[in-house]
Amino acid sequence: MKSVAVPPFLKNGDTIAIVSTARKIAPDELLPAVAAYEKEGFKVRLGKTIGRSFHQFAGSDNERLADFQEMIDDGEVKAIICARGGYGTSRIIDRLDFSRFEQKPKWIVGYSDVTVLHCHVVKNHGVATLHATMPLHMLKCDQDQESFDSLVAVLKGKIKNYDFDPHLLNRAGMASGELTGGNLSIIYNLTGTASEPDTDGKILFLEDLDEYLYHVDRMMVMLKRAGKLENLAGLLIGGMTGMNDNAVPFGQSAEEIIRAHVEDYTYPVAFGFPAGHGPRNLAMVMGMPSTLNVNNNGCSISFQS
C-alpha cells in the first residue's frame, strides 16, 4: 500500500485560507474564527466565496470551484479551511485540478460535507487531510475551544492521541490501519464514484446528523452489500446526532443499527468517539496510520505521524 503524504506543518506567520465549497456563509459569521486563528499566529485570507450567494450555495458551482482551485494553487496558502458544510462539494470535486497540490501538499480542513474532499484527496492524490471543526461552529462554548485547540495542535505538528469512554455496544480488540471515512450520508453518496473510499484494511470512521433511523439502516445495508464493511481493520463511530424516527418507530437507535450490520465480523468496534456534529469535535488526520484499542475499561485511538 502506498503511504499517504502528510502536508507540512504550519508555523507562525503562515497563511490559511477560509473558503466555502458548499452552503453560503456571511463574513461576519467568521469573525470569531478569524480572530482565533490570528491569535494563534496565522494570517487569514477569506476566499471569494465568503459572502456570495447562489440559492443555498456560496456562489455558483463555477465560483466555488474557482475559489478552491485558487487556494490549492497559491503557494502562500499553507492550509485551506472550509467555512462550513451543508451540501455542494460533490458538485465540483471532479473538476478540481490537484496536480500542483500533489507537488506541494497543504492541509484541507473540515467535516460533514467536506467528507467529499477527505475521501477524494486521500484516495486519488495520496495526501492526508484533517477532519476537524469549522469556522461556523467555532468558539460558542468551552467544548468548541477544545475542538479548536485540537485542530491547531495538528496544524502545528502536535498530533494528539485520544482516550474516550467505553460503550455497551463496543466490540473489544485492537486494530491498526489508515483512518478513512467521515459523514455516513456523504460516504453513501460517494459510493460508485471516483471519490469512493477504499475501506479494506482501514479503520472506518462514521458520524451523521439529522437522519431518519431507517435512512441509517438503508445506508448501512448498502455499505454492507457493497463490501465496504467486510474487510475493515476496525470501526470507529462518532456522534449520531439529532436522529429522527417515524410515527411507527424503527425499533433501534442509530448505534444499534450500525452494530447489527457488523455483527458477522470480528474486528473491534468503538462507539461514542467525540467527533462529528456534537459539541466536541476532536481533530483527526484522515489517511494517517492509526491504532484503535477497544476494551471494557475504555478506548483509545493513536496516530503514527
Image: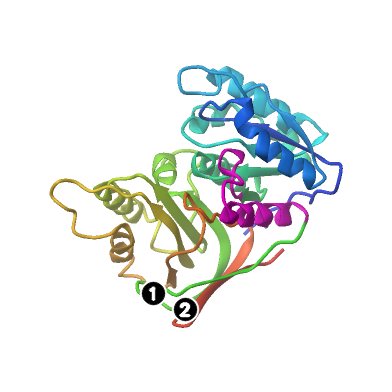
Image point 48% across, 82% down: which residue? 297
Q: Is residue 149 visible?
A: yes
Q: Main secondary structure of the magenta part?
A: helix
- Magenta region: 131-156
Q: Please tell me whether residue 29 belongs to the stretch shown in magenta.
A: no
Q: Residues within 10 Å of mark 2 (few under 14, many from 20)?
A: some
Question: Percent from the top left, x then y, of residue 295?
Answer: 47, 80
Q: Which residue is outermost to the right?
A: 13
* Residue topped by disc 2: 173
The reply to whether discs 2 and 1 touch (Cβ–Cβ < 8 Å) is yes
Q: Is residue 286 visible?
A: no
Q: Is residue 217 above or below residue 294?
A: above
Q: Is residue 162 above or below residue 27?
A: below
Q: Is residue 42 left or right of residue 63?
A: right
Q: Is residue 156 above or below residue 298?
A: above
Question: Percent from the top left, x then y, of residue 202?
Answer: 52, 62
Disc sitting over residue 266 in the figure: 1
Q: Residues within 10 Å of mark 1 (few under 14, many from 20)?
A: some
Question: Upstream in the sequence, badge 2 or badge 1?
Answer: 2
* Figure quadrant of the N terminus: bottom right
Q: CA distance from mark 2 to mark 1?
A: 9 Å
Q: Is residue 288 left or right of residue 71?
A: left
Image point 61% across, 54% down: which residue? 147
Image point 61% across, 48% down: which residue? 122
Residue situated in front as seen by the camera: 283 or 93: 283
Question: Percent from the top left, x then y, of residue 138?
Answer: 60, 44
* Figure quadrant of the C terminus: bottom right
Query: Could you say which quadrant of the image residue 111 lies in?
Result: top right
Query: Could you say which quadrant of the image residue 281 lies in?
Result: bottom right
Q: Amino acid at mark 2?
A: Gly
Q: Amino acid at mark 1?
A: Thr
